[in-house]
Image: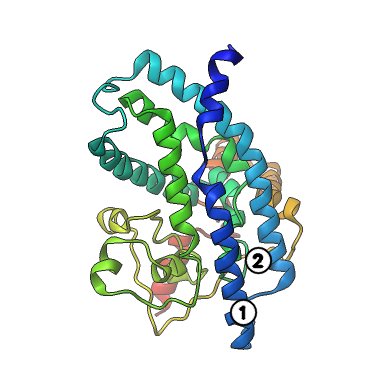
Amino acid sequence: MWDFFKPILIDFQNPVLYAIPFFALLLGIEVYVNYKDRSDNYVFKDAMASISMGLGSVIIDVLTKSIALIVFYWIYNNYGIFKDELNWTILAWILLFFMDDITFYWHHRLSHQIRLLWAAHVNHHSSIHYNLSTALRQSWAELFYKYTWYIWLPLLGFPPLMILTQLAFSLIYQFWIHTKHIDRFPPIIEYFFNTPSHHRVHHAKNINYLDKNHAGILIIWDRIFGTFKAEDPNEPVIYGITKNIETYNPLIIATHEFANIAKDLKKAPSFVDKLKYLFNPPGWSHDGSSLTAEQMRKNQEEHN
């Protein structure tokens, strides 16, 4: 079995690996600009924590991506519906771009609306600073199930190497939007594409900004499905999560919300409440001691 899959695994040249030198260059430029402007946007321990999370995710992804590739090829070879039509054609790349992007949107959106998924995703939002190092603060737990969201693509007949390549391109695109140093692009670009302005909103803990702009590359999905929020120049973004964790330890960053869930499950008065602590939006509580983003917005509107 290994002899069959070995050439497949070797043939995949992850574009992210080739992008790493450019990531480092852009990161260095931003650090220099931060120093020149005497800004406090970079804190050494925070940046090192983010980079450590990024390195950890690369190591874990070697395993999970290899397993995903094997599963994708099994599905593709045995059940791929349109694999002759979608075999590395230009049309296939165009279709894959949109299908990958909408898959990312829904995975990302549900990672903010289902607490168990949020526990895996929250570390990406845990820094109170917003810079290119924050882009590297990738989830570890998410990698163990991330690729299941894309199983429908080899089933349709997209070659697995195409799928993983497109996923890599999406990840590369999302690196540069983690910056404060780009204000806004012309309206036509801001309307269709995820930009630093849109993504700053996504990383905000302001009540008005919570759970908005889940886009990968195209912001149109947020506009279509009602989760878009423009950055308001009159409401500066405050970065982080509603209850900041105040640690630079990568292990705590990666697991703290799972620990919080365990505490809530222990105090839940019923089995149904335990399920709600797992699958309701983050912030839900059986006694109202904590609130979801929508509940906080509703309270804010009632007091305004």
**Residue 218 seen in the current view:** yes
Q: Residue at x 32, y 74 (%)?
A: 185
Camera-nearest residue between 298 and 3? 3
Report which quarter residue 44 is drawn in. Answer: bottom right
**Amino acid identity at mark 1:** Tyr
Residue bearing mark 1: 32
Camera-nearest residue between 86 and 151? 86
> Which structural element holds mark 1?
helix
Residue bearing mark 2: 244
Q: Is residue 26 above or below residue 152?
A: below
> Which structural element holds mark 2?
loop
**Residue 241 seen in the current view:** no
Camera-nearest residue between 38 and 273? 38
Q: Position of residue 91 (x, y in %)?
A: 23, 37
Report how many numbered discs are placed on residues in the image: 2
Q: Residue at x 65, y 66 (%)?
A: 244
**Amino acid identity at mark 2:** Asn
Quadrant location of the N terminus? top right
Q: Residue at x 25, y 54 (%)?
A: 224
Camera-nearest residue between 144 and 119? 144
Q: CA distance from mark 2 to mark 1?
A: 27 Å
Q: Is residue 36 left or right of residue 77?
A: right
Q: Is residue 163 above or below residue 261?
A: above
Q: Position of residue 24 (x, y in %)?
A: 60, 63
